[in-house]
Image: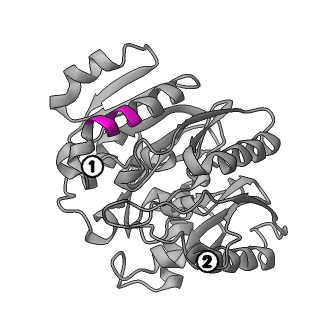
Amino acid sequence: MYPINLNFKMPAEWAKHMRTFISWPVQASMCYPEDFEAVCRGYAEIIQAIAEFEPVTVVVNPGDLENLAQIFQNERIECLSIEHNDAWLRDNGPTFLVHDSGELAGVNWRFNAWGGKYAPWDLDDQVAPQILDSVGLKRFDAPLVMEGGSLHVDGEDTLLTTEECLLNPNRNPELTKEQIEVELKNFLNVRKVIWLKKGLDGDETDGHVDNVACFAAPGKILLQVCDDPEDENYAITQENLKILREETDALGRNFEIIPIQQPPKLCHTETNTRYTLSYLNFYFVNGGIILPVFGGKAKETDRLAAQVLCEVFPKRRIRTVNGMGIIREGGNVHCTTQQMPEGRN
């Protein structure tokens, strides 16, 4: 039995949260293990910022429990001991669902570390069911490799994703685009899937949508854009803009598209690989938004991004955090988080 048959569905991220789940980093899995302490400081900043708005549960390896008890002496922050390989809970955690009655449940997707890029991932693939068990929720096991960062929903039957990620042969090579759509509709209870082509240049997740576009409200989409024709993101964002201008949502509405200018291009000084800098990797919290900002040459685009979000969400407090704190590891605020909507167990 699918969630759609039982009238469970994924709510929009801006719906009220019961709490946020986030994982604590694991040095052995890091691209740059010498940065471990700095990355931990980046995670601590994000966790403490979220806790200003709502409770936070930190998924932590057993050996780190004592250390975190010293770092987080805040009644809104609790630790949950679950062994894990890596710390991007948006992608290996459960997707929470809500029934009309308020009952909560969750989807347990399959996880293969972004197409087998980072072994081992066996522990990460078991995190979602353990979280759902810890909060006593019904579990729907999906036969689909899927990461939470690869999709957004508007809460009114429309889902946004990219072909670059979901159709990548390193995820579900045995499934067609149409078959993947059917699974998304069955497990998340949506009626329409909108397919953008690509995510941002250099994104090692193979184009997660949460770096390039997101719903601000039903019928309203925030889109990170690039105005420099010499930048690889120019063609990508122009194509996505064209798709969205020609699309409608599940209820037949044309989209209001709100552009956010991308930060200046920034590459790793040693490898020359591009950092995936995105203001759209922000995270909705109760009454606010946690926004990564990048400083330096991005000071002006930081200001403009915060200004746009203030205008779009006048009733939310825009809480900025250091977007450079964890970016060397490949993601940012939204990638680390997973919202548990308000409801009942």
Image spot of residue 301 (x, y percent) = 68, 51
Rendered image quadrant of residue 262: bottom right
Pick the front one: 189 or 324: 324
Residue 44, label in figure:
none
Q: Mostly what secondary structure, the magenta segment?
A: helix
For image coordinates 73% across by 33% down, the residue present is 316
Q: Residues within 10 Å of mark 1 (few under 14, many from 20)?
A: many
Please tell me whether residue 308 is drawn above or below residue 157 in the rendered image.
above
Q: Is residue 271 left or right of residue 99?
A: left
What stretch of residues is rendered in magenta? 37-43
Q: Say which label, 1 or 2, has the lower sequence index.
A: 1
Colouring mode (rainbow / by chain / secondary structure / one colour): one colour
Q: Does the magenta run of residues contain 59?
A: no
Residue occupied by mark 2: 236
Identified by mark 2, the residue type is Ile
Image spot of residue 211 (x, y percent) = 55, 60
Q: Check disc 1 and report its element: helix, strand or loop.
A: loop
Image spot of residue 69 (x, y percent) = 28, 18
Please tell me whether residue 290 is drawn above or below residue 8 in the rendered image.
above
Please tell me whether residue 84 is drawn above or below residue 143 in the rendered image.
above
Identified by mark 1, the residue type is Asp
Residue 86, label in figure:
1
Q: Is residue 199 left or right of residue 124?
A: right
For image coordinates 80% across by 60% down, the residue present is 219
Rendered image quadrant of residue 142: bottom left
Residue 136 in view in this figure: no
Q: Is residue 17 left or right of residue 95?
A: right
Question: Are the two marked residues, 1 and 2, in contact with CB atoms closer than 8 angstroms?
Answer: no
Q: Is residue 300 left or right of residue 43?
A: right
Q: Does the magenta run of residues contain 42?
A: yes
Image spot of residue 136 (x, y percent) = 38, 35
**Disc 1 from disc 2: Cα separation:** 29 Å
